[in-house]
Structure formats: structure tokens, C-alpha cells
Amino acid sequence: MSKVEEFVDIVVVGAGHAGCEAALACARMGMETVMFTVSVDSIALMPCNPNIGGSSKGHLVREIDALGGEMGKNIDRTFIQSKMLNQSKGPAVHSLRAQADKSDYSRSMRMVLERTEHLSIRQMEVTELIVEHGVLTGVRTYSGAIYHCKAAILCTGTYLKARCIYGDVSVHTGPNGLQAANYLTDSLKENGVKMYRFKTGTPARIAKKSIDFSKMEEQKGDVRIVPFSFTTDPESIQKEQVSCWLTYTNEETHKIIRENLDRSPLYSGMIEGTGPRYCPSIEDKVVRFADKNRHQVFIEPEGIHTDEMYIGGMSSSLPEDVQIAMYRSVPGLEHAQIVRNAYAIEYDCIDARNLALSLEFKKISGLFSAGQFNGSSGYEEAAAQGLIAGINAARKVQGKEPLILDRSEAYIGVLIDDLVTKENREPYRMMTSRAEYRLLLRQDNADLRLTKKGYEVGLISEEWYQKLLKKEQEIEAETKRVEATHIGANAKVQACLAKHGSTSLKTSASLAELIRRPELSYEALAEIDEERPHLPADVCEEVNINIKYAGYLERQMKQVEQFRKMERKKIPADLDYEAVPSLRTEARQKLSQYRPESIGQASRLAGVSPADVSVLLVYLASTGHRGENEQNER
């Protein structure tokens, strides 16, 4: 066995999207960091869909960027098509989505990591955690080398005891045929960590030359490309884009699938893990939505340096011969040549309720985790957790309090709170509907919400912070000016209103009153706003939203204040729930097991009722345990 011993500040296990953000955050905060991966060639790998962002996921990427993460910058460097989704709806659900050149995305992120000070990359499997009296002190690798550290972050993705399956073929390998990590699970179990078995899947890849695009609907990118990163100059990314294509399954496709369900490992019992409800395989769709006679199929390029095409919407674990027949029944794919078979992948993960909101294990000090290892799905969810885990591991080493984002501050806060509070029986996927305060948590204002926090932890430069402060001042000043500016019912104004299908004025009105009309906007009124200053497009967007949705925003802010009152009512970490009279047995068991940090978090635990929360509040008050909120009010 190796006699190598190294001393570092932080160890990151895994180099997927969570591991990359975690390692960069730690290193950029001055921590000597080593990142382990089973293959250096798999850094920032996109083993499934070749895109970043999408509904709600685009919000996460913007928030990662606002805090000082890398994902938004990297996709801006490597995208081949970009589109803002849901533009026909309100700004709360606008979400950016970009097709990536997969190989370029990975190569670009790897270069950033390799050139980052305080960060080393090591191709080696971590097999064991070294824990002494409940404190993580290091890790041991397959070679026997020991890396002593002050904190570690597990970002193992779908690699722990991974198994790829299609039909009756089962291969003990990670995604894309990469080596699985087969030993760390045992070490986790030895340290009291309960493991779950989850499943995800990916569609086949087919050769572009075998596709008949004339039978499909072309899907082009936006004419004006919007960057993910607030630091990217929009003019620098306006370029020619690659098209995607839309086709549909049909009754023949569904017939082939139904006739072969007995050969699907999903239904034969061969697959043990639970799959994602919101990203089902095509056989799942056909069974669960039997009334639908077709399902969308998106044909997406894997990159500009390859002719492999991704078959979005048709992930599967059916046998190879069934896959060939199934894909070839789809219009435009009649002569499809499969390059890589679709497959399901099973892997070990944890019950994230064993984690604090900082993503540190409650019972193992110094051990953090992020990404699919925590029971989530998706590149964006993984990267968001990786960034927070990295920040908090570094802050722990620095002797500082963790950065906690609550549900009213960020989609990242919703994501982490859901993971560590709720029982997730399947891979968790972020959705806009999960965010109670989504009108406040828009993708356009992520920098206004979070960049100050990124600056405080040391991930945002002074230059960018000063730009943010200037932007805030411009938004505030212009909003006040528009509210105070009145215009008369003159001919020019009436003509402008008529042009936009708006009712004419009978008396003067403020610009703000006009902007609140559904058919008008800040931009639409530019021609009659004679005192309007020249402002950046992002400032104008915020002014328009702030004015148009002022009533709704104010109402949601009041809801947030009520929410925060509950979050500020802290629960002592050592509270004996057995001593709390009148608590139901189930609530007592759940509270004792997961030890919520606040009354708000306790209220979101499955098995804890509003009546239990009331009992807990009365008990805390009667025993002199005052939350932070009550102490401040005194």
C-alpha cells in the first residue's frame, strides 16, 4: 500500500458539475484544495442532455453566477444555441436555456480548474473516510494514500456502485462507460450514513446522416442572445446558432413499447432504484399517459465537432432490438443509426435529511455533500449545491458562520431546504412551482438578490460589486422618476397609445400608471418620455418589472416577512423533544431524527402538523427559549 500522506485544507470527491463548483469556490476563497475524479477526462461531463438551463434551472444558473460560480460563464463560452423560454408568460417564469457543445463545455471548465490557484486535480478513487470521534480528518484513496484535511465535500454524482442497464444487459460502470466508484459506500455505511438506491436514464445517440430532417419542425434559437452570466458582454456572444428539431412518437411507437414491456428492466424488477417522476423514460410515459397518442421528441446536436444527435424525450432501458424498432417508428428517424444505446443507471445516494442547511452532515463534522449524491437530479441542481457546499466548507475552515439562503432569497434556498427537510423518494428536480415567492425570485434579478452575498464570502470582485451598486442606484432613481413623471393628453401621447392598442387619455397620468396597463411597457412609452435617460437594457428591464408588478411584489414581500418570522425562531440544537408535552408521537420522532434548525423548517417536515408547531412554540416560550426574532424585538 502507498505510504503517501498529504495535508490540504479541503478535499472534493468528484469532478462533475457539483464538484467543479465546490472545488473552485474553496480554492478561490484561499483554501488549499484537491479534487479527486475517477477520470480527468470526465471533468464537467454532460452524460445526458447537452444543455444548461431550462424552466427553473435557468434561475439556478443565474443565481450560481450571481454568487460567483462558474457554470453561467462556462455555458456562455461554449453554447451553440440559446433561447429564453416562457416569454409569452410573466417574468417570474422566464428561463434561459442553452444547447452546449458538450466536449467544449467540459474542456473549457477543465481549463478553468487547471489554471485556478490553490487547486490540484487528482485522478484517483477515494475509497474511505477517516473519521475520529465524529470529526472528519481525512480520506484514503484506492492506492492507500492518505489526504489529511479540515473538511471534505462528497460530489460523487451517479458513480457510487453504479450499474448501467438496458434489456437484460447490466454493466457495473458509471455513465458513458466510465469507471464506477465501488468502495466509498461501505465507508459511509460504517460511519452511520444510510444509503438509498436511485435511478436515472438517458436516450440513445444517433448519427446525424441517418436523420430525415424534412419530416421534423426546425427549432431555432433567439434572434437576440441573452447571456447567462451577468459578467458576460451581450455583444460578445451574438453568433450564428445551430438548430434543434422537433418530431413526435406515434401509435406505432407506443405499440412497440407496450408489446415489449415484459422485457423492460423497469417492469421486470431488474432495476431496484427509484427514477425521477418529472423526467420519465419513454416506456414510463406510454404506461402512465396511456390516453396520449403522441409525445414530443427533440433532436439536439451534441456539439459542432461531432455528428452525434441526442434524442430528447425518449430515454429508455428497453433491449437494443426494441430501441432500434422504437426509434425508427418516429417520423424522420426511419433509418436511424444508433451510435450509443439508451440506458438506465442505478447508483447509491443519501437521504439528504441527514444534512444541515449548510450541506454539512449533522453527525460528521467537516463532511459536506452536494449534487446527485444528495438525491437530486440535473446539472444545475448539482452545481448550485456544489457552490454552497464549497462556500460553507471554506467558511468552516475559516471559523466563520455558514452561508444559508432561505426560500425567500433564492431558488437555491428552495432546492436545499426541500432536500434537507422533505422526504424525497425519487431524484429531486427543481421547478418554478416549488418556489412560493417566485415573483421575487426571478432570473433577471438574481444579481440584485445575491451578488452582495457573493462579495461578502469573497467570490465577487470589487469591480463587479461596484457595478452592482451602480445598477441598484440607477434602478431606484429611474423608478422614482417614472412614478413622479406626468404626461398630458396631447396628440403625440394619444397617437402612441393608439399605436399600442391602449385607451386614450382624458386627463394627465403618470408614466407609471400607463406602464401598468397590460398592453404597455417602459420601452413602449420611450417615444413620449422626453426626459428619459440613456440606461443599460438590464436596468430598463428591472424598472419595467418593478412598476408593472408593484402591487404583486408588495403583497409577496409581506408574505416573505411572515415566513422570515418563523425562520428566525430558532430551535436549540440539543432540545429534548421527549420533554415537550402534547407533541404527537410521529412529530416527536421526526423532530428528534432530523433536528430542524428553526420553527419554519420544522413546519415543513413530513409528519409535523400545524398543531405540533403550535405546541412547540408554546413550549419554547414557556421554557425561556426565545428565537432570534423575539430577542431582537426585546
Image (tube, grey):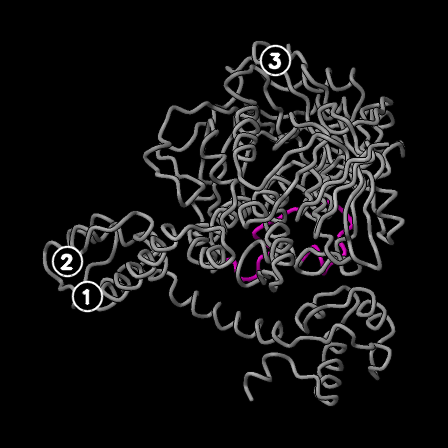
Q: Pinpoint residue 323: horizontal percent, then vertical percent.
A: 74, 19
The residue shown at (60%, 52%) is 388
Asked whether residue 294 appears in the rendered view, the answer is no
For badge 2, the amino acid type reads Glu
What residue occupies the far left of the structure in this picture? 491
- Quadrant of residue 120 within the rendered picture: top right
Q: Pinpoint residue 106: horizontal percent, then vertical percent.
A: 57, 29
Asked whether residue 332 appears in the rendered view, the answer is yes
Which of 548 and 429 lies nearest the eye of the viewer? 429
Q: Gap in Å between the C-alphas at discs 3 and 2?
A: 57 Å
The residue shown at (44%, 42%) is 229
Q: Which mark is drawn over residue 531? A: 2
Q: Which residue is mark 3?
A: 207
Picture quarter with the C terminus: bottom right
Q: Which residues are magenta?
A: 418-438
**Disc 2 to disc 1: CB gap under 8 Å:** yes
Q: Gap in Å between the C-alphas at discs 2 and 1?
A: 9 Å
Q: Which residue is mark 1?
A: 485
For badge 3, the amino acid type reads Ala
Circle 2 residues within 10 Å: few <14, some 14–19, many ≥20: few
Earlier in the chain: of badge 3 and badge 2, it is: 3
